[in-house]
Every structure is written in structure tokens, then in C-alpha cells.
């Protein structure tokens, strides 16, 4: 991911992001930070970039021309998402960070003095972002905050453990208290449960602590968490039909845009995916008014919604699927022994054999540690993975290795890894793919009674 920062103080931005995790990510070329000096683009003598505001008032304003020319030089006419950092912007949250992390390039404009001429903002800016209700001397620190929060979501930037944490069960809640050695410090003892070795008890204790802390310190977040829990509870009455929404909420990916007893609209900003369920056409129409403009994918389980979405968003139906899920969460036997996590060196093999995803998507899935391979005598012969929204898929086994239980082993291996993280494995099987459906049934997965549709925006 590439960040272009338009600023009067490039060194401030670059020096602040040179160290630690972000610095290493830049060295590894997982991210790139390009700081552009707005002053280099002024046409005024002596490098002047500011002037008095029309109508009077305190302070100076950055002029439109140098900002616009710097922006033009960076974008070269491309439509890049452009953020202006300002206390007048929308509050910056983890959800905003997830949304921005979906971009390949991002332009960040840092204001100074009393701000920037409104006309250039109108011409260039797509998002106005504030990092809090206070006023800084310029946008640089805010841009650095945004770059840090977005970069840690770029696959490969965080260590393995930490990246799993970003989609952990504790999403939407504040972190539980943590302890390290020694066991007793200034007569304060580490809570007994953490020394018990009982992982279920530890997880339950941590969840309770997180809930209690959130309720006390951030009642607003706690309310949101409870809304999600209530919706999960309601959707669980038809678990097989709603598993995609339940797991999206459970894994902290889906936001509730609307929910009542009979209607639901969820949005996964990382995948730019809307999941919709409505009791009738009229409610469907109402929900469609709430769909974020950057949505590119839709999942519905009612055919009347397909028509509405297709006509309202110029979409087409990609797939009709049966949902399968594995709610019992018991570990499955894996017969084939040589199954391993795939690395970047395996990407070409997967790209050659899997034709339902762009090469970039497959590389991202591997980078996100979401794909496993089956090796026979040391050679990669098949693979399986999880999609970015959470469902399992991408199963492939070479013809020469079929009928040896490798496909079932790959599936079982993937299922076990998902269960270990406390999630319910689920998949979408295209209607008519009876071979896959019978494999899922043999493994113990249950199929939904109805079907669901995937729709996407036409190019
Ligand atoms: N520029 C000055 N103050 C700011 C803030 N709070 N957020 C974003 N940009 C800013």
C-alpha cells in the first residue's frame, strides 16, 4: 500500500514513521510512504504558500494553487482516495482504518496555519477525517496516526499473533488486563485463573474483564457490543441460513447498519460487502437506501432483493449457493499428514490452478495466512483457504492425487484451524456442485434449507 502525504513538513512525517513496526514494513516494501513538499509547487517568489483570508479573521490560509498542483503531480489524473486531516472531519475509528486499508494508494493532505482554501478541498478531497476533538498545529500528526492504524492492517505488517488478534473475539471491547513475570510484584499476585492452564476458563475470564472494563470506561462501545450480541442471538434461531452474518459479527468484521426483529443490513467495510435480509419488498427498498456508496458486493437470501439490488446498483448475480456450517466445533481427523501454511513462494502454483480469484487476491490471502497446501513427497499438490469475508473455499487437488482423501484432509485441517480460533467454520457451495456438497456433509457440516446469492457491481 502506498501513502502520498502532501505536507509543508515532509521530514516530520518521514522521521516519525521510520522506526519500529511501520519502519520495518516500509523496509520490507509492504508499505511505501512518499512525502511531497507542497512548497515545491508554489508559483510565488520566495516559496510563499499562504495568504490572508478574504473577509478578515485571524491567521493565514494555505492557498489553493500549490496544494492542487502537488495533488495533480501525485495522482497524475488518477482517481485516488484523498483524505484531508481536519478537526471538522468525521471521527477516525478502527472501521475507518479498515475501510482505507482496502485502497492500494491513498493521498493525505495536511493543512497548516488556519487551514486550506475551500475550493481546492472541493476539487480533490474524498474523505474528511478528524483524529479527535482537539486542535493540532497541523495535519501531520493526524496523518501519521492514520498511516500507522491503516498500515497495521496491511497483511504481513504485524507478526502472526498480533494479526490474528485484530479479528479476535474481543472486537468492539476494550482489552482485558494482561500480566507477565514475576507472579508476585509489590505483593500483587497475578489472578489464579491465568496460571490454571485451562484455556476455556482463561478465555471466559478475559471476556468478562473486557466486558466489565468496556461497560465502565466506554458505555457507548459497550452498547454497540450488546447490540451485536443481541442480533447474533436472534440470527442464531436460523443458524444455518444466517451463519454468514453471525460469523461476520462474531469476528468483528460486520457493522450493523440496520437491525430489527425481521430485517438486517450488515456492512463489512474491509470487503466492501453488504449482507441483507428483509421481510418484504418495501423494507428491502428502505434498506437499500442505507447501503454505503463504496459497496461492491452483496449477499442476500431472498430473490426479490436480487431484483432490487440489480436494478438499483447495476449489479449482476455471480453465484447461487447453499450455505454449510460446522457448529459442533469438534476437531476432525486429518488423514493426509503433510499439510502446511502456504507462503509467497507458493502463490504462482495457486494462481495457476485456481481461477475464481484475481492473482492479487490470492497473494493477499496467502499473505494473510489464510491458505494451506497439501504436499505429496515434498511437492505441493493441492490447497484450501478462507475468503476475506470469512467463508472457507478455494479447494483444489491435482487430478493425479485424487481419490486419496487429500481434499477431505485439506477441508478438515482448515476447519480445525478455524475452530481453534473460537469461530464456526462455514462455506458457500455453488448450487449444482454436488461433489463438494457431499464432501461437506461427510465431514459433518450441515446445509442451509434455502439458498443465498452473491451479487457484484458490473465493471
Ligand atoms: N488538524 C488539526 N487538528 C486535527 C485533528 N484533531 N484531527 C485531524 N487533523 C487535524
Image (tube, rainbow, N blue to C red):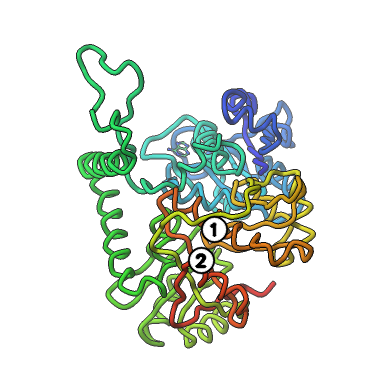
> How many angstroms separate mark 1 from mark 2 (CA)?
7 Å
- Which residue position holds label 2? 443
Q: Which image quarter is the N terminus in?
A: top right
Q: In the rendered view, tell whether residue 39 sits above or below residue 366.
A: above
Q: Within 8 Å of ligand 1, the CB of disc 2?
A: no
Residue in the foreground of this view, choosing between 310 and 228: 228
Disc 1 to disc 2: CB gap under 8 Å = yes
Q: Residue at x 59, y 51 (%)?
A: 370
Q: In the rendered view, tell whether residue 297 sits above or below residue 82.
A: below
Residue 279 visible in the snapshot = yes
Q: In the rendered view, tell whether residue 441 sits above or below residue 228.
A: below
Callout 2: 10 Å neighbours few (<14), some, many (20+)? some
List x then y, in percent, for residue 333.
Answer: 51, 55
Q: Residue at x 38, y 56 (%)?
A: 250
Q: Within 8 Å of ligand 1, the CB of disc 1?
A: no
Q: Residue at x 56, y 84 (%)?
A: 311
Picture disc at residue 412: 1
List x then y, in percent, for residue 169.
Answer: 38, 48
Question: Is label 2 in a helix, a strand or a loop?
Answer: helix
List x then y, in percent, for residue 147.
Answer: 56, 38
Q: Residue at x 54, y 35 (%)?
A: 148
Amino acid at each position: 500500500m502506498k501513502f502520498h502525504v502532501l505536507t509543508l513538513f515532509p521530514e516530520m512525517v518521514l522521521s516519525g514513521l521510520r522506526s519500529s513496526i511501520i519502519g520495518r514494513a516500509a523496509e520490507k516494501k509492504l508499505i511505501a510512504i512518499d512525502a511531497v513538499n507542497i512548497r515545491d509547487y508554489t508559483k510565488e517568489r520566495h516559496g510563499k504558500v499562504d495568504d490572508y483570508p478574504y473577509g478578515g479573521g485571524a491567521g493565514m490560509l494555505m492557498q489553493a494553487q500549490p496544494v492542487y498542483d502537488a495533488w495533480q503531480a501525485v495522482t497524475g489524473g488518477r482517481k485516488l482516495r484523498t483524505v484531508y486531516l481536519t478537526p471538522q472531519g468525521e471521527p477516525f475509528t478502527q472501521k475507518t482504518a479498515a475501510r482505507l486499508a482496502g485502497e492500494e494508494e491513498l493521498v493525505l493532505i495536511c493543512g497548516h496555519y488556519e487551514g486550506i482554501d475551500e475550493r481546492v478541498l472541493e476539487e480533490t478531497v474524498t474523505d474528511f477525517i478528524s483524529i479527535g476533538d482537539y486542535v493540532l498545529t497541523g495535519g501531520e500528526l493526524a496523518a501519521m496516526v492514520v498511516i500507522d492504524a491503516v498500515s497495521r492492517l496491511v497483511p504481513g505488517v504485524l507478526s502472526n499473533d498480533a494479526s490474528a488478534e485484530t479479528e479476535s473475539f474481543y472486537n468492539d471491547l476494550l482489552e482485558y488486563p494482561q500480566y507477565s513475570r514475576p507472579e508476585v510484584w509489590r505483593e500483587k499476585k497475578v489472578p489464579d485463573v491465568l496460571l490454571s492452564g485451562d484455556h476455556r476458563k482463561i478465555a471466559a475470564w478475559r471476556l468478562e474483564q473486557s466486558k466489565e472494563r468496556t461497560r465502565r470506561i466506554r458505555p457507548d462501545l459497550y452498547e454497540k457490543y450488546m447490540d451485536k450480541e443481541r442480533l447474533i442471538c436472534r440470527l442464531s434461531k436460523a443458524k444455518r441460513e444466517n451463519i454468514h452474518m453471525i460469523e461476520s459479527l462474531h469476528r468483528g468484521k460486520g457493522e450493523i447498519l440496520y437491525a430489527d426483529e425481521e430485517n438486517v443490513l450488515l456492512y463489512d467495510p474491509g470487503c466492501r460487502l453488504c449482507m441483507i435480509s428483509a421481510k418484504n419488498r418495501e423494507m428491502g427498498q428502505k434498506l437499500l437506501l442505507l447501503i454505503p456508496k463504496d459497496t461492491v458486493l452483496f449477499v442476500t437470501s431472498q430473490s426479490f432483493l436480487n431484483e432490487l439490488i440489480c436494478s438499483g446498483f447495476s449489479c449482476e448475480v455471480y453465484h447461487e449457493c447453499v450455505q454449510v456450517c460446522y457448529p459442533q466445533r469438534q476437531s476432525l481427523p486429518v488423514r493426509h499428514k503433510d499439510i502446511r501454511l502456504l507462503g509467497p513462494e507458493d502463490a504462482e502454483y495457486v494462481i495457476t490452478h485456481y481461477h475464481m480469484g484475481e492473482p492479487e487476491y490470492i497473494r493477499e490471502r496467502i499473505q494473510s495466512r489464510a491458505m494451506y497446501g497439501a504436499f505429496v513427497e515434498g511437492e505441493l499438490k493441492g490447497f484450501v483457504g478462507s475468503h476475506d469475508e470469512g467463508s472457507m473455499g478455494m479447494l483444489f487437488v491435482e487430478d493425479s492425487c485424487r481419490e486419496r482423501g487429500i481434499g477431505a484432509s485439506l477441508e478438515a485441517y482448515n476447519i480445525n484451524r478455524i475452530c481453534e480460533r473460537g469461530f464456526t467454520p462455514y462455506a458457500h457451495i455453488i448450487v449444482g456442485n454436488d461433489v463438494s456438497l457431499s464432501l461437506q456433509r461427510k465431514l459433518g457440516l450441515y446445509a442451509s434449507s434455502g439458498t443465498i446469492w452473491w451479487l457484484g457491481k458490473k465493471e
